[in-house]
Image: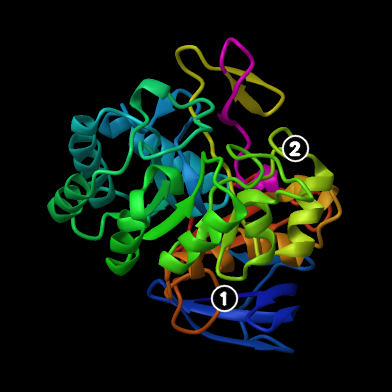
Amino acid sequence: MTTVLASSAVCLPDGPRAGWLATEEGLIVEHGTGSPPRGAIDLGGRVVAPGFIDLQCNGLGSVDFATAVPAEWRGARIALARHGVTSYCPTFVSAPLDAYPGMLETVAQARAGSGPDESSVLGVHLEGPFLGRAPRAHDPALVRVTDLDWLRDLLAQRPRLVRLVTLAPEADPGLAATRWLASSGVVVALGHTTASYDDALAAADAGATAVTHLFNGMAPWHHRDPGVAGAALVDDRLTPTLIADLVHVHAAGLRIAFASSRVAIVSDAVAVVGQRVEREGAARLPDGTLAGSTTLLDGALANLVAAGIPWPRAIEAMTTVPAQLLGCTDRGLLDDGRRADVVVVDPDTFAVERIWIRGHEVEWAHR
């Protein structure tokens, strides 16, 4: 069955404009401008965008992906979809090395059992344990230098499941793990680090292509010592990710990042369990340390627009940019041959109103 969506603000590959797109069997099969084919769903002035892609999501609500059981995974995937997140990377923070095989097994099982109303797992993001001198909410006792033999064994057990690894240059002697991961098709992000600007450039030379949650978990930018943050803002090889809950980064910081670089927005969402408490859209430990966010990507979109970021750029940062960073050529754009993952957004409030995943409309909306 063919479904045609039409609006005066469709995010087509060459920019938003009045247009339409046709989907069939889970894919976008045709798109165009002007009058749509007969029978189109007229969405008026609603913004029609690709499905949101979250590269860093540790959990949400009471569900922590590190300990979740199958029913909790399904509930979390449904909740993410209802917030416009059609694809995501479940993220695991620093843990004992012997805990990771079990966590990856759980992800593999969860991905195999996903349904049509659920956000799909792109692959795992390992945020640690190979971090540096800025662990922040990570347990310092679990942070360690890279173990290349362990990485090789883990990835061999679950081929193509780990898609993104955040590590610190100072925890990777000779940048051997960075080189190996990059050569194996895994995206390497620099994070939780006090590495210098030159160290960051050396890591980019070795294959790093991202910086995890820009401005957070790294030395502050200084005009004489720009550090990893400075490298992320000026080196085109590095795509910084950014948390847009207006707690982790001030609105002015968001504008600086968007003015200087090509940014991918992440939620860094966490479950509010154990010692974590929710406060103003973020999670904190009892001592006040930020431990992640509770704002998902739909909320981030509204925050970005309120901060003065043009909405086409904000949407690109949570669709096209993350897809390209991971090398996903099947999503992230409303183009022929791509997955029919579509989000419809109110042009005034930027709240998500309708969602299609692989051409199937999610049975829920903010309506």
Say if the magenta span includes residue 299.
Answer: yes
Q: Quadrant of residue 13?
A: bottom right
> Which residue bears the numbered disc 1?
334
Residue 81 badge: none
Foreground residue among 244 and 262? 262
The kind of residue tagged 1 is Leu
Q: Is residue 299 left or right of residue 179?
A: right
Residue 246 badge: 2
Foreground residue among 145 and 93? 145
Q: Is residue 168 visible?
A: no
Rendered residue at 54%/46% (across/down): 195
In terms of sequence position, does the residue under pointer 2 or pointer 1 come before the other?
2
Name the spot of residue 324 as percent of width and height, x first: 50, 70
Residues shaded magenta: 285-300
Name the spot of residue 110 as percent of width and height, x first: 27, 43
SS at circle 2: loop
